[in-house]
Image (cartoon, rainbow, N blue to C red):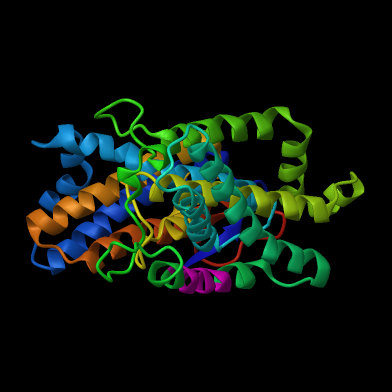
Amino acid sequence: MLRLEKRRQPSRAFAWATPVLAVVATMIFGGLLFAALGKDPLVAIRTIFWDPLFGQHAFYYRPQLLVKGGPLILIAIGLSLGFRAGIWNIGAEGQYILGAICGAGVGLAFYPMEGWFIFPLMVIAGALGGLVWAMIPGLLKVKFGTNEILVSLMLVYVAEQLLASVSLGLLKNPQGFGFPGSRNLQQYDSAHNAELIAGTGMHWGVAAAFIAVIFAYILLTRHQLGYHIRLTGEAPRAARFAGVSPTRLVLFCLGISGACAGLAGMFEVSGPAGQVTIDFNTGYGFTAIIVAFLGRLHPVGILLAGLLMALTYIGGEIAQSGLGLPAAAIQMFQGMLLFFLLAVDVLTGYRLRLGGATKEGEAA
């Protein structure tokens, strides 16, 4: 019979092979899912992973990799710092929403005034909106010992209600014929997050994501704070003896992850989305958790994982329209990626063995 045997040391080879094995397993079982739905699995997999890059209309889809990958990378970078330290912010979706509301609110407050200073103020407001929302579970954790997972997750639902409220009230377009939603920021030059290079999908949100990758890499490899983050996650007792302040670390990690999520929301609402609506949030905050772990919580890995997840978004949309696959099947396919990532990751610390228990002291 098969059993799990703990390794004496985690396998570095499996640590880096896990994302690749998870993607392969997702393709195999995803193909079986598509076959069960009456679709050719090879065609479906090709449509999702190949057509957006090299298909007939790839010239249109390639820029979308940056558009959809930018917010995923930016949010995942912020989350990864906390995850490395054992601080679990699961409410990035709510912080993303608050960043969008605050950023759009500042921009609309100046409408129809034009000025170079409006967009920078929106950036600051978006970051502060996400940061403040993340500080709620942070402060509750350090003051009362509450669980940041539950608090941050529950605040997502509060943020969604705030989004609906401002879409129907405070930020509602007075010239929108009664429909919920704000003015279109794409038509307001001073508040529009336009492409920096036409036809590439590169806007300020994508640039911020790349800057975050560089910042996180330098922080984790060259700065004392990054060492404290890694030490706390790997050896909490040693971190306490080394003088690491748990309170400061919790507030920093939750604050930076909230600010990154808020920025992602602001860049999205002022760019690709264009306006605050009831259904503005599309799950980027939750998908970024998959991206963070798929990238092994490493900045460069997160960059690649974000682009891969963006590819599944775009390919999934093509598969829905071209092959008639239901949206739920695509979401399940994306969910498989996290499932297999977590399942295969077990083999980093354990190995599969056949037969009975090994003798005590046997080499791992």
Say if 280 sits above or below 17 in the image: below
Report the label total: 0
Magenta stretch, main secondary structure class: helix
Q: Residue at x 53, y 37 (%)?
A: 120
In reply to whether residue 157 is colored magenta, the answer given is yes
Answer left or right for 111 relative to 11: left
Q: Residue at x 90, y 46 (%)?
A: 243
Q: In this view, which residue lies farthest toward the front?
A: 113
Answer left or right for 137 relative to 208: right
Q: Position of residue 107 (x, y in %)?
A: 47, 48
Between 174 and 13, the one nearer to me in the picture: 174
Between 151 and 111, the one nearer to me in the picture: 111
Answer left or right for 206 relative to 256: left
Answer left or right for 239 relative to 204: right
Residue 252 in view: yes
Residue 294 in view: no
The residue range painted magenta reads: 154-163
Q: Position of residue 309 (x, y in %)?
A: 35, 47
Between 342 and 10, the one nearer to me in the picture: 342
Q: Residue at x 63, y 71 (%)?
A: 151
Say if 201 sits above or below 126 in the image: above
Q: Position of residue 95 (x, y in %)?
A: 54, 58
In reply to whether residue 313 is colored magenta, the answer given is no
Q: Residue at x 34, y 66 (%)?
A: 279
Q: Position of residue 203 (x, y in %)?
A: 38, 34
